[in-house]
Structure formats: structure tokens, C-alpha cells
Amino acid sequence: MKLLTFGEILFDKFGDTYTLGGAPLNTAAHFKQLGGDSAIISAVGNDELGRKAFEEIEKLGIDASMIDVLEDVPTGIAAVTLHGKDATYEFSYPSAWDRICVYDDDIEDIGDDTIIYFGTLALRSTTSFLALEKILGETTPKEIFVDVNIRKDFYSDDLIAFCLDHATILKINEDEINIVADAIGLDDADGDSLYAWLCENTAIETLLLTRGKHGSDLYTEECKVHVPCSDVKVVDTVGAGDSLSAAYLFFKYSMEMENKEALLKATAVADYVVSNKGAIPLYSAKMFV
């Protein structure tokens, strides 16, 4: 089983400190740390941050062979402002991840044992959108995991519809439900009504709804599962959802666990992440496996 993520590689900027991030990269990193095989399709600039990104990605063990290095556009930056323990982001534009390309050799390597992951942010540019559209049109992956990951000014109803049309697993947080509901014309949506709509109108079979400190809900055809968070001291929440996504996929598909057990394990990983600084704190897989 391989996880292939598509999208932004960037540096989160906290004051004068730069930390490697981007939801697709964070997700690939946690999947790898847990013992899985992961790769990312993205782009960085031919600049100091781009070189730093490659160094850190190599240390994380993620397959970096599908990352382009671009001459005419810089590596992405997200200026992070913390509001207590929560964060908002201001993204540089244009950034290298707005110019993601995919090549025929890359597509040939995407087999039916691959899980493809993407979110809405990297689709803000036509170039990257068309690259992803090509991948989805020419491959038959095992699952397509979409993290809606709404970011201000970088989504549209059409883009949300594209995501729903292609996903088999959808991850959304409780703040995003109304945005998605408005896009599809669903009134007074909650997790139950959204999942019912998705089952009737899309190929989505699994809905992962995150509720911050209140835990997560998992909807499948067989069951609805709620798993609360543990009582941990929260340092920051950057990357918490990404670690939950990666861990759920790892335990569900690589370790072949049942949904409830996979979500329990994934929640434990996310609890560890929020109790440490940064989106990709180092840990041993033995802590959770």
C-alpha cells in the first residue's frame, strides 16, 4: 500500500522561524513515520527554501522523485498567526506549488494499490488543477482521499463539486460543513445529513468529520463511530488534522484494522501531535503500532 499525496509544499512562517509544512507533505510524513510508503507530487523553487525542503523531505524518508524544481517561481510560504492555540494562514502567491506538473512516467507508476490524497488549496491555479485532473483521469487508485481543507479566498463551489465528484473518502472539519452544504444546496447540514447526501449523489463511502477538541466522527455504510480526544495539554494544532488523516489511512489500509480501531489509533497520533510543537514532531511508530 502506498500513499501518494498531491499539492503544496511550503514553509510555515512563525515570526522569523520557517518550518516545513503543507497539508499534503504533513500527511505523507506521518504516513511514513508510522511505517508506510509515501510520495508527494509537488514543486519547489530553485532557492534556499527549496533546497532546505529537499533536505528535510529526504530525512523524513518521503519519496521526492516527483517534486519539480522551478527557476521562475519561489518555494511557497504560509505566514502563520496563532490565535491562542489555533492558527490562521496567509499564503504567498504565486508559489512553486501553483505550477505542479505531472509526467507520463509518474502516472504509469500509480497502481491500484495506491491511495491518492489531495485538498482544495493546491487547486487554486489552473496548472496544478489540470495536473491533478490528468492523474485522476488516467489512473485507478484503491482510494481517493480528499481533505477539503478550506482556506479563505482559495476555493469555489465548482472546486468543491470537483472534489466531491472524485473522492471515495472525504475529510472535513465541523467549520467546513456549512461551506460544503452551501456549495451543494443542502440546508441545515450536519454530519448525518451530509453523509446521506454524499452516499446518494457521489461515490464517497467514508466521511471523516473532525470536531477539534471534541474528537472525530467516522461515517461508513456499516457504522457511525465517534472517538473523543484524550485530555492532553495542547501546544499547537498545526498539522493535527493531517496526522489524523495519515494515521487513519495507515491503520485502516496498511494494517488492515477495522474502522473504529483505526480511528482510535489515529486519534492517539493526533493527540500526540497537538501536545508537541510543529506539524511533524518526530516519534517512533512503536508508540502507536
Image (cartoon, rainbow, N blue to C red):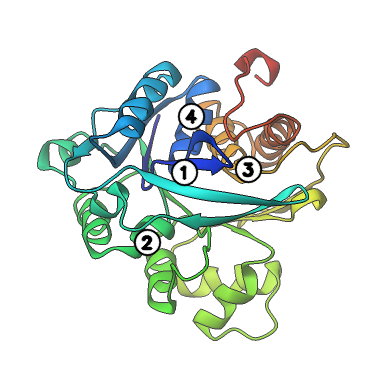
In the rendered structure, are the residues bearing label 1 and label 4 in contact, judged by CB atoms less than 8 Å apart?
no
Task: Kindly report the distance in space between the C-alpha atoms of the residues bearing marks 4 and 2.
Answer: 24 Å
Mark toward the start of the polypeptide (1 vs 4)? 1
Q: Could you say which quadrant of the image residue 5 lies in? A: top left
Q: Name the amino acid type tagged 1.
A: Gly
* Residue 22 marker: 1
Task: Kindly report the distance in space between the C-alpha atoms of the residues bearing marks 1 and 2.
Answer: 21 Å
Direction right: furthest residue? 231
User: Does residue 61 sit above or below 114 in this rendering?
Assistant: above
Q: Give whichever of 259, 48 is nearer the camera.
A: 48
Q: Position of residue 233 (x, y in %)?
A: 85, 34
| Mark 3, other Cα within 10 Å: few <14 / some 14–19 / many ≥20 | many
Element under label 1? loop
In the rendered structure, are the residues bearing label 3 and label 2 in contact, judged by CB atoms less than 8 Å apart?
no
Element under label 2? helix
Q: Give whichever of 17, 97 is nearer the camera.
A: 17
| Mark 1, other Cα within 10 Å: few <14 / some 14–19 / many ≥20 | many
Q: Which residue is mark 3?
A: 238
Q: Position of residue 21 (x, y in %)?
A: 48, 38
Q: Which residue is mark 4?
A: 29
Q: Name the amino acid type tagged 4.
A: Ala
Task: Kindly report the distance in space between the C-alpha atoms of the residues bearing marks 3 and 4.
Answer: 14 Å
Residue located 52% across and 33% down the image: 19
Q: Which residue is mark 2?
A: 166
In the rendered structure, are the residues bearing label 3 and label 1 in contact, judged by CB atoms less than 8 Å apart?
no
- Can see residue 170? no
Residue located 55% across and 26% down the image: 255
Residue located 25% across and 59% down the image: 133
Mark toward the start of the polypeptide (1 vs 2)? 1
Task: Kindly report the distance in space between the C-alpha atoms of the residues bearing marks 1 and 4.
Answer: 11 Å
In the rendered structure, are the residues bearing label 4 and label 2 in contact, judged by CB atoms less than 8 Å apart?
no
